[in-house]
Structures are given as structure tokens and as C-alpha cells.
Amino acid sequence: MSRAMLKPILIHPDPRLKKLAAPVDDLSDELRALASDMLETMYDAPGIGLAAPQIGVSKRLIVLDCIKEEGATPRPMAMFNPEILASSEETNVYEEGCLSIPEVFAEVTRPKEVEVAWIDSDGNARKEVFDGLWATCVQHEIDHLDGKLFIDYLKPLKRQMITRKMQKLKRELARG
Ligand code: NI
């Protein structure tokens, strides 16, 4: 028996957030424990999604739960090797944020619906169509596995401004 452990979340800019994450080829107990630690870390933050590279693990694993309504049943999901099979022509705009870019929010346009395939924690192949916030969240998290952040969708000037703000924040955090 092991208890879930909160993991420190990397803050942008960090080279580990820019790397292409490796596929998971063997679903070990260690990886299952990692997924459960990531869910705990995400809920604690609080956030609605977290990707393994954000805690310095370069593996294709994401967790999410976009149920935000007070009193609603949570729907924690862990996806190993998630892959977008199809995207809608229709788009949606959400104000996105990221646990690796704290207190920064910006509108990003993405496909409104996506069909995603993944391996769940029991090793089963799964497939589902997501829309609305779930679609945005799953796309945002899969981007992390390819070293892409939501600010990469913004204009260069805005992105640079945000990066400078994060560099300043990291200096302050380092000073304690
Ligand atoms: Ni993020």
C-alpha cells in the first residue's frame, strides 16, 4: 500500500516542459502510482489537468477532471499514450490557464470536439469523443506531451511578456 504523494510542478520557462515525451510501453505499478500522485497533485493545486512533463517525467501520461460544479461527482481520468484521432472543424474559445504558468490566463481557439484514444490505468484501450471544456483540456494536456504550452498559441510579444513575468516569479520563489 502506498499513499499518494504531491509532486512539485515545474514553472515555465523550463527545458523539461519543451521536450517530446516518450510513449509508455509497459504499464507498471510504478506508473499507476505516478498517475494517482498526479491526480492528487492536480486536485491540490487546484487544476483540471496535469501532464507528466509538468512534474519532470518525460512520459506520455496525462490526468484530468473537468467536473467543476460544486457537489458534482468527480471524474478523475488518467490517460497513457493519449492520441487525438479526429478533430471537429468547429472551434471553441476558452480562457486557458496552466499550472506551469500560474496566474496567467489567455483565450485560445481549438477544435470544439476531439476523438481521443488512450490506454487507461487497467491497461484497457479506450476511445471517447470529448467536447466543450473537456475537449480543450485534453488538447492542452496532450500538447504538453509534445513540449507545447498554451502560450505558444499567442502572439510572440504577448508570449515574451508572459515568459518574463514567469522568470521574475521563479527568481522570487528561489529567494523564498
Ligand atoms: Ni498546462
Image: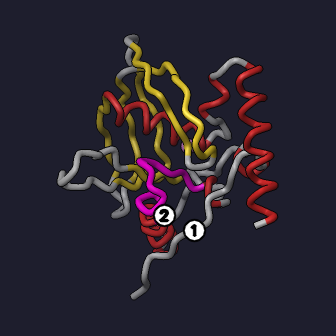
Q: Which residue is mark 2?
A: 41
- Closest to the observer: 4 or 99? 99
Please identify the quadrant where the C terminus is shown.
Answer: bottom right
Q: Quadrant of ligand 1?
A: top right
Mark 1 or mark 2: name the one nearer the start of the chain: 1
Indicate whether residue 165 is drawn in magenta.
no
The reply, left or right, for residue 111 in relation to residue 154 is left
- Mark 1: secondary structure: loop
Q: Tell me: residue 43, above or below residue 143.
A: below
The residue sitting at 46% across, 73% down in the picture is 33
Looking at the image, what colour scheme do you see? secondary structure
The yes-or-no answer for disc 1 within 8 Å of ligand 1 is no
User: In the image as oriented, which residue stretches furthest toward the bottom?
Assistant: 1
Q: Position of residue 158 (x, y in %)?
A: 71, 23
- Mark 2: secondary structure: helix
Boundaries of the magenta span: 41-52
Using the numbered discs, state the Cα–Cα distance from disc 1 to disc 2 in whole angstroms.
6 Å
The reply, left or right, for residue 73 in relation to residue 49 is left
Amino acid type at mark 2: Thr
- Closest to the observer: 172 or 21? 172
Circles 1 and 2 in contact, beta carbons < 8 Å: yes
Residue 7 tag number? 1
